[in-house]
Amino acid sequence: MVDTASVRRTMLPPGPRRPYTVQGLRMLYTPEAFAGACRRRYGDTYTLGVPRRPVTVWSSDPALARLVTRLPDEVSTATEWNAAADFLWGPRSPFVIEGEEHRRTRRLVMPVLRGPRVLARREEIAGAARRAAAGWSRERPVRLLAEMRALVLELMVRSVFGTDADADPLAPRVARLTETLRRTTLGSLLLPWTRHVPGSAYRRVLRARRELTDCLEAAARARAERDGGPGLLGDLTRARADGRLAEDALADQVVAFLLGGYATTATALASTFDLLLHHPAALARAEDEAVSGGEEGAGDGPWLEAVVRESLRLSPPAWVFGRALRRPVEFGAWRLPAGAWVAFDVPAMHRRADALAGLGAEPDAFRPERHLARAADGRRRTGAVSSWHVFGGGGRVCPGSSFAPFVVRTVLAAVLARVRLRPLRDRPGTLVRESTLLVVRDGVPVSVSDR
Ligand code: HEM
């Protein structure tokens, strides 16, 4: 007799049987609808095949996310998953290095993303946001996504150059090249063969990436004589001088920092504004808190913190992250084989009813107040936050996981205190998947008036 349990254990979860090209095209052009149809038919975890990619298990099950993100690199790695964009990252990027080198270089980057150096930037960030808002048109619609990109890019470049940002002639070039890379990367990922086509987006990415490396190296060399200087560039220049950072790793680290942090945080800001502007009571409370200011300054109050948590839950800016398996992994009835990829559908994960345990009902509703609930002992309820994966998980969890919400809260408060924003449509915009990001399709058009 066949032991069906053991047969299933050697199998992947079920999934569509259509040709890989059809599955690939549906995932590319209608990812939301396709993923929804697969979830309804096959459940939280299903298998897809797309051309030129290993077979991929898609999942919105937080238990599988916890399992595979906590396994060591020898079993489950982000390297092969992230290597789809290796032409952009470079060989020493945190997205592709592993083991001791990964842990060591991560420690070098953290001081600009956590703790006193971040808190000391509150007024600088708020000031940049106020200046940006003061310059927005009062007559024509303003698209907040574009404005947030410009603002966050400026802030990220300031993280890199520190207090030198206004004086260093290389800083504006770094900003321009980072923006070129953001705009051209998706096309290159989708059409890798175009690397042979003169003038293609792929070639523009390669050229911009080379120029960015040259620029960062020139900036680091100029600082080497004066002990590195301020900002991330200073930290990394010093680390390279005393052997804590490999000679050829500096540019790859900075590029990961800029590209990992810039579009994601700008997307989070635009989505948060969009949700807030379509919930008048929540907006009024946010405006009150922004005008009165938190204890420590802009963005420090509990309501804006709750707003940002709820927005990141409902509109996670990075909708997918993944791992490649190097050894088989057993999960429930399945035995996921070595070589398979596992991809996590983050918005679907966050909208599961069980992801809210302790935080009220209606997972599809925007309700910041759910994050203010206190348990009987007076402690803030955090609900099933372990089933949220806004920032990925395990040893590769996003290093910007506290910096990004800090920036979002600070910018929100500064903008709301400076201007009055009103939405130009009657409901929040449709979220679409662009590369790995979940963005509001029309870029959040608003009207702006002085407060
Ligand atoms: C709301 C904003 C952000 C979101 C949603 C986000 C999301 C993510 C996700 C999902 C990952 C993959 C983690 C994994 O594989 O487990 C990641 C990795 C990463 N992020 Fe972020 N991120 C944000 C902001 C930032 C910022 C501000 C920075 C830096 C300034 C940053 C730098 C990185 C880097 C370097 C990695 C690679 C980490 C590694 O593999 O060690 N991100 N991020």
Image: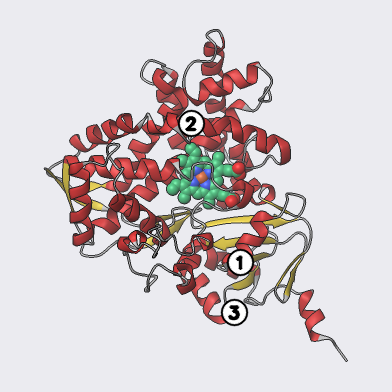
Instruction: Give residue 385's mark.
Output: none
* Image coordinates for residue 258, horizontal then vertical, percent: 49, 35
Gap between marks 2 and 1 measured at Cα: 32 Å
Q: Residues within 10 Å of mark 3 (few under 14, many from 20)?
A: some
Asked if marks 2 and 1 touch (Cβ < 8 Å), the reply is no
Q: Which mark is residue 112?
A: 2
> Disc 1 designates what residue?
63
Can the viewer see residue 225 in this picture?
yes
Q: Is residue 76 left or right of residue 260?
A: right
Q: Earlier in the sequence, mark 2 or mark 1?
A: 1
Compared to residue 243, the image places residue 384 above or below, namely: below
Name the residue at 31% across, 50% down: 302
Type of amino acid under label 2:
Val
Note whether 408 is above or below 361 in the view shown: above
What's under tag 3, amino acid-wise?
Tyr
In the picture, residue 325 is in which quadrant? bottom right
Quarter of the image for the C terminus: give it. top left
